[in-house]
């Protein structure tokens, strides 16, 4: 089967990260006939279990959550139409590192004696696993987290490091040709959220008397993944696919409550809340932009 002309590779830490951050983008690009490949670095074994009947799967009980989340990811990808999704090194090669909250409200590595967690992975070894995928898929665009992993989760940070290093190694001529022919990823983007859009959403909810699930957020000192407009390079309009994104998020039932804040915002403000996804450009040159200086397509200019 011939490969699509335009190909996107996404590198995420756990099942559900892809649907929250990029579900609408993925669904739109699949519908447009572009290639979409998802690499997930762990099974998410240390995640919370929000379904009471499945509480026995938790890491401190039967430790069966990872295997269960493989099924959730498969169901989510069916909702957005992604058929090429894989785990870095194979299912369970790296274990979810877990996390704790620090005094600043950001995530930090959890106390653990385990040596198989992704946070402790050898960077070159993990990068080689991804180099092989990059050289096989030959994507023009790669999407991952920023250097802080959006909010400090150690697995997000490690996914960023592995993705950025692997993209660099994959392009080096005559480097590890056993992993495939060299390939230079033209554009790399980091996921983000628009601070101005979140401010606007909060204002609209207040004016309309709607309870804001993020009402305690300090927009003057926002979390690091909420970025000002000048930091944004691209906004993908996936509002036509917002329902597919929400269905994909709902498929991750052990992690995301259907009546939780994501769905509350969507129900109250419509598909635009989660149907538009913004990105920061980490490598490459912007293509055509609008009056804000934003691209409307990750493949713009290619």
Image (cartoon, rainbow, N blue to C red):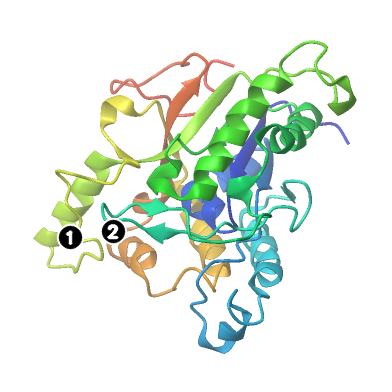
Residue farthest toward the bottom in the current orientation of the protein = 53
Residue 140 shows in this picture: no
Q: Which label sits on residue 102? A: none
Q: Quadrant of residue 66?
A: bottom right
Q: Is residue 41 above or below residue 302?
A: below
Point 45% across, 24% down: residue: 281
Give the quarter of the figure containing the C terminus: top right
Q: Which label sits on residue 205? A: 1
Give the quarter of the figure containing the N terminus: top right
Query: Gap in Å between the C-alphas at discs 1 and 2?
Result: 8 Å
Point 57% across, 56% down: residue: 97
- Image x and y of residue 17, in percent: 53, 53
Helix, strand or loop at label 1? It is helix
Point 61% across, 85% down: residue: 56
- Between 218 and 112, which is closer to the camera in this rendering? 112
Residue 45 shows in this picture: yes
- Between 124 and 295, which is closer to the camera in this rendering? 124
Mark 1 in CB contact with mark 2 (< 8 angstroms): yes
Mark 2 or mark 1, which is nearer the start of the sequence?
Answer: 1
Left or right of residue 256: residue 38:
right
Q: Residues within 10 Å of mark 2 (few under 14, many from 20)?
A: some
- Image x and y of residue 245, in percent: 51, 56
Q: Which label sits on residue 269? A: 2
Q: Residues within 10 Å of mark 1 (few under 14, many from 20)?
A: some
Point 70% across, 64% down: residue: 70
């Amino acid at each position: 089967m011939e490969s699509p002309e335009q190909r996107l590779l996404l590198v995420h830490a756990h099942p559900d990260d892809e649907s929250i951050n990029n579900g609408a983008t993925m669904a739109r690009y699949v519908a447009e006939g572009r290639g979409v490949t998802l690499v997930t670095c762990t099974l998410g074994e240390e995640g919370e279990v929000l379904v009471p009947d499945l509480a026995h799967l938790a890491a401190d009980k039967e430790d069966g959550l990872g295997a269960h989340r493989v099924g959730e990811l498969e169901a989510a990808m069916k909702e957005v139409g992604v058929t090429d999704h894989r785990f870095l090194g194979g299912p369970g090669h790296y274990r979810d590192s877990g996390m704790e909250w620090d005094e600043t409200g950001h995530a930090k590595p959890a106390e653990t004696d385990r040596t198989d967690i992704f946070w402790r992975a050898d960077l070159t070894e993990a990068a080689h696993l991804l180099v092989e995928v990059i050289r096989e898929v030959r994507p023009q665009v790669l999407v991952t987290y920023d250097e802080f992993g959006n909010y400090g989760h150690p697995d997000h940070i490690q996914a960023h490091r592995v993705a950025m290093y692997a993209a660099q190694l994959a392009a080096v001529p005559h480097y590890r040709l056993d992993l495939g022919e060299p390939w230079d990823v033209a554009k790399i983007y980091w996921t983000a959220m628009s601070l101005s859009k979140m401010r606007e959403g909060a204002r609209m909810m207040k004016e309309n008397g709607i309870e804001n699930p993020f009402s305690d957020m300090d927009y003057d000192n926002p979390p690091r993944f909420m970025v000002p407009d000048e930091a944004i390079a691209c906004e993908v309009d996936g509002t036509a696919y917002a329902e597919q994104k929400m269905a994909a998020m709902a498929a991750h039932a052990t992690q995301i409550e259907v009546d939780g804040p994501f769905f509350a915002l969507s129900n109250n403000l419509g598909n635009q809340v989660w149907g538009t996804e913004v990105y920061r450009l980490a490598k490459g040159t912007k293509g055509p932009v609008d009056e804000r200086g934003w691209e409307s397509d990750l493949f713009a200019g290619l």
